[in-house]
Amino acid sequence: MKLTQLFERGEFAITAEVGPPKGFQIDHLIDEINTYLKGRVSAVNVTDNQSSVMRLGSLATCKVLQDQGLTSIFQLTCRDRNRIALQSDVLSAALLGIENLLLLTGDYTTLGDNPQAKPVFDLDSVSLLHMVKKLEQGEDLAGNPLEGEPPSFAKGAVVSPCSDSVDVQLVKMEQKVKAGAEYFQTQAVYEPEKFIKFMEKAKQFGVPVMLGIVIPKNAGMAKFMNENIAGISVPDYMIEELKKDKEKTKAGITGVEISARIIKECKDYCQGVHIMAMGWESKIPDILDLAGL
Amino acid sequence: MLITQLKSKEVIAELIKGKTFIINCHGCKEVYFPEHEADKLQKELSADGDVVKNITRDYICSTDNLHVQLNKFMDKIQEADTILVFSCGVGVQTVAKYFEDKRVYSGCDTYPLPGFQGLTPQEFDCAQCGECYLNYTGGICPITACSKSLVNGQCGGSKNGKCEVDKNMECGWERIYRKLEKLKKLDTLDYPAKIRNYRLPFEELPKD
Amino acid sequence: MVDYTKFELKDKKELAAVLQDKDNLFVVACKKCFKEFELVEEPELHDFELLAAEQGKTITGSVKVDFLCNNILTPKLLESVLPQDTENIFVASCGLGIQLIAELTEKPVYAACDSIAYRGHHGMALTTTRCDACAQCYLNLTGGICPIVDCSKSLLNGQCGGAKNGKCEVNKEMDCGWDQIYKRLEKQGRVDELKNQTVEIRDYSKVNYKFIDEYVESVRQERLEGYNGGIHPAENKEFSEHISLTKFPDPLTLVIPLSQHTGAPAEPIVEAGQHVKAGQKIGEAKAFVSSPVHSGVSGTVVAIEPRLHPTSGLDVLSVIIQSDGENTIHESVQPVGELEALTPEEIRDIVREKGIVGMGGAGFPTAVKLNAPKPIEVVLLNGCECEPVLTADHRVMVEYADDVLFGLKALIKASNAEKGIIAIEDNKPDAIEIMKLKTQDLENIDVAVVKTKYPQGAEKMLIKNVLGRQVPRGGLPLDIGVIVSNISTVKAVSDAIQKGMPLIERVVSVSGERMSKPGNYIVKIGTQVKDIIDYCGGVIGDDVTIKMGGPMMGVALDNLYVPIIKGSNGIIAVETTEQEAVECIKCGRCVDVCPMELRPLYYAKYAESENWEGMKEENIMDCIECRCCDYICSSKIGILSAIKAGKRAIKEGK
């Protein structure tokens, strides 16, 4: 099922994200997905060596998800592969029945656990979208015709609505739409006002946007994100909220409350929500319940 | 432009066995050369090993110049088992080619500096990509100003206008955006996806 | 020589698209670098103008610039040439030039050219040898052949399967790099090393941006420190900087040239056979710009005849005196009195009468300098001694600080200046300390500490750094209210007033890595250089060059039977360097180091064709002959001799 079908129907789409293990034993992952996500979310993203930490491949993991009866979203970054490998992987995805893609530039190599690797960045998110569009039209990037039926995907991209360079991000967003982006999942939002303001400008592109949520686990995590992660800013009052009742925060209740609240405030301004649980997949049902989804 | 840093003493000591002739190149000293560290290291090597001679010359990357400047040392060089060269990679390769029968080792690692001409490194660089993008970016090079060398706009990694890779560096695409904003030419960024041609260096190999 | 031109005109179609909605264009073209220097027109400007004309565009003007990316000279140029009605600027250069122009102007700037892509960086000799600056040199594994540049795939663990007939699969004209490596190692009997090599994987994080940025910052700062350009040759002052001054024994014969100064030679007022005393005037200054000359010993005038001048290479009328060993002092040598009791005019008369000229080398009559036609605000003392090796002024500051200050006060009074500044380079901490101590209670005399960089001591550089003022082109320091003087000169002024002794001796720094016993000697003017060298144990080795002066501006002495004169600050023995000139490669280093912001590569080129007009257009008369360009030249071209030839020809009215 393509995510775009949901948007066309006017449905509020709910998706979640999982990161594969650093190994190839996936039983635990499958358990979590079946227990907490199946039936509650429309599709599940599988990250691609997220934060430049080497992990089990997104493509293979997506296939595992598909076999479990879930709709997967294949995340693809430009950090590790050149255009030849990227096109090849996209065709492979089509073979394995994957219909949804999320196309990103990717974090730099030095941020991860194999910092000496050669950063590729042959393409970036815009040219990657363009590349997939061309494949869908039956041609590769160099103009060579594909054999047989061309693939077809729901092509997604990312944008950071709360970035300090939000005007620059909007320009990039437009580029992505022109290159073929059909839906967006945003970077984590903690300030509904900023998100709403962003959506006022972004809606002119006429492309569905899914609110990104990262469950805040504690005040320390919030502070870390503020200092180190681009496009994320957790307001002070929220950090106070996390600090106030340490037991409650540790149990995940505060995080769930905050996430649900943000969703409630923003859901009228967007077309879906994308939850990045960072290991707290078990909390997702609670959030959705609390948010009335 | 090129500058050098010394390899570690352990690494160098391992390489030089037997009689060693040391050549220091000060040709690009005004750009940078770790003079004092090299001097100290060479003194230590002399104390620990068998250094037959230690000379400082310049522009050893020129074979003609090398020939003239090393003329009076040829006996000593032939006597040596190893020639240890403290210079950039071009100098080491030139000496190695000149003394093809001898073990020639590099005492340095070479790093790049922005700019080509003269002695003063520029504030910005030219990556010699062969397909200048400056017409789309208000005169700021996306290949060198962006750590990822992206050509289609900012990635999501910039924070406070700084690059995710090097927090002391401004996000190149942020700079480009602000420049075009100032020039009232933001529409210049409205171009179909650009993709680099990495074939170009192979089409332009200079001939001797 | 390989042509490493960095750019070429963009594709016509692409340019036409860029030109479409733009008009009133100004075109800037770089004259290119890193290729053999020929006086030819580069085609890009003309081709672009043709294209623009075809598109019906108006060109408001154009300019061709040497080393467009040079961000000292280019900004100055751009300011003056950009026409008002320009709307768009097109730049024909590599990415550096375009980016610089884009930074310098508010107007939209466009690239008319693409850069040319090369693998790796070339060196300073334009050979095919290149280095990719990978920061983890592999040359030690490969016998000196770079696998990153010479292998198309930059493989590190041996040949791939693609080579055919020893040629690369990517480019059939290129040798397989690993094939070459194997052959080289085989020749050296090192193939086993290749077999036993541990698996090499490149570390791409090695090129640490932070460290590079720091270097860029510090190098840029150094180049602009005090004044633009300059160099940092090895100082080599440790041979003599801590050796105290000692008197050099009076020689048996003094040969005193009647011309040791700028201006008309002195005319002899003694004759052969005449007895003279120490401090007695033996040559009279008849012209306005001239100086008298005095005897340094008592004895008999043996002859008055032409003798070889140490630095001009010509014979000059000289007074030869045989010492009687008594050192009887002449009656005119009398202390003159307190400075307070002397008028400025009286001080100037003493300075002139006692034969004092600039002892830093040029020998300009000090009294004439003090009698400036314009008001003087500052007397600046050059305590830099920026020449490597020399330590004469250094020792004078340390050991005769009071005399130096006295002399400075005298100059301040004589020129009606408001204040004095003693500029000292930071490589002389002891001199700085003493001078600071001695001036702390003085209201109008200060010590300025400047960063060591040659030629800091040149008057225009000194004024720029210490006072932040620029001497106008073709002008003099007095045009902006400044007089610059040398340490030894003010010491001589002090002796002239406090002792009544004229300029008959000076400190000579005898030094250099090939001088057996270096020292700093107080030598009588007219002492033979040979005697000094012998006294100091002679030189070490056969490959030695002896110079009068420092290694930079000193004159090589083929003949050691020449006298010490008023401007002889040093006698040095250094290793003779062998060098042969090759073609200029337009590396731009001479332009980068020139403290007068000139373009020395043109002087060398124009000298070849005796194009003196061209040299004049390149402001050759502003050249201070510091030799920075000559020193840094990567092609070992004798730029200084080209400059001297040019200046000579222009002075002769050619």
Image (spheres, coloured by chain):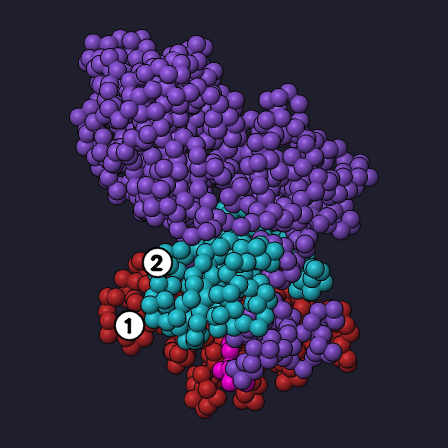
Chain colours: A red, B cyan, C purple
Instruction: Kindly identify which residue carries mark 2.
Output: A235
Instruction: Kindly identify which residue carries mark 1.
Output: A249
Q: CA distance from mark 2 to mark 1?
A: 16 Å
Residue C200, magenta (yes or no):
yes
Amino acid carrying mark 2 in the image = Pro
Residue C648, magenta (yes or no):
no
Q: Is residue A256 left or right of residue C98?
A: left
Viewer-nearest residue: C646 or C142: C646
* Residue at 39 percent of width and 60 percent of height: B38
Q: Is residue B130 left or right of residue C230?
A: right
SS label for mark 2: loop
Q: Which secondary structure class fits the magenta region best?
A: loop
Viewer-nearest residue: B74 or A196: B74
Marks 2/1 same chain: yes
* Residue at 43 percent of width and 32 percent of height: C562
Q: Is residue C567 left or right of residue B207?
A: left
Of mark 2 and mark 1, the one earlier in the sequence is 2
Q: The magenta stretch spans which residues?
A: C195-203
